[in-house]
Image (cartoon, rainbow, N blue to C red):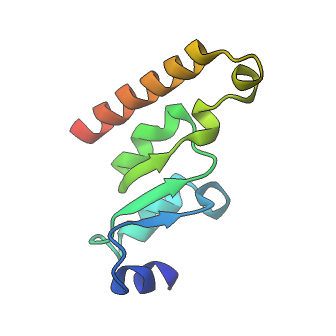
């Protein structure tokens, strides 16, 4: 398995990409059962609303580029919207970690 190989080769954290195509939250949960010692970062297709569940199921962190960098907001140079999305994501992530 690539995750174990990466960890044994010295990776401090392993990126699981594309997590949504592999099963999303359930896939992260399934990976943590045999590999509880391996920190995982979930990437691709994650929504702001699902941050907490990914963290609760064992992801050490998540990548939210599509969720934060909204295409419409970028096209309109609406940096306030991007800031609000990022701020919301940070608050939800922090809340999930503290559970």
At x 51%, y 82%, the residue is: 2
From the viewer's side, name the closer residue of 6 and 53. Answer: 6
Compared with 16, 46 (above or below) is: above
At x 61%, y 51%, the residue is: 44
Percent coordinates x, y for residue 12 in the rendering? 32, 70
Q: Visible in this render: residue 61? A: yes
Give the side of residue 37 with respect to residue 4, left or right.
left
From the viewer's side, name the closer residue of 29 and 79. Answer: 79
Compared with 43, 87 (above or below) is: above
**Picture quadrant of residue 52:** top left
Give the side of residue 98 with respect to residue 28, left or right.
left
At x 37%, y 86%, the residue is: 9
Percent coordinates x, y for residue 16 in the rendering? 52, 64
Quarter placement of the C terminus = top left
Compared with 4, 66 (above or below) is: above
Give the side of residue 55 with respect to residue 42, left or right.
left
At x 67%, y 28%, the residue is: 70
**Picture quadrant of residue 32:** bottom left
Percent coordinates x, y for residue 47 in the rendering? 57, 37
């Amino acid at each position: 398995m690539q995750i174990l190989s990466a960890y044994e080769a010295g990776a401090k954290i392993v990126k699981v990409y594309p997590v949504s195509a592999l099963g999303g939250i359930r896939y992260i949960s399934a990976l943590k059962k045999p590999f509880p010692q391996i920190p995982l970062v979930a990437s691709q297709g994650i929504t702001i609303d699902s941050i907490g569940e990914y963290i609760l199921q064992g992801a050490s962190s998540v990548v939210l580029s599509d969720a934060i960098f909204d295409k419409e907001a970028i096209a309109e140079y609406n940096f306030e919207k991007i800031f609000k999305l990022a701020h919301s994501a940070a608050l939800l992530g922090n809340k999930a970690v503290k559970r």
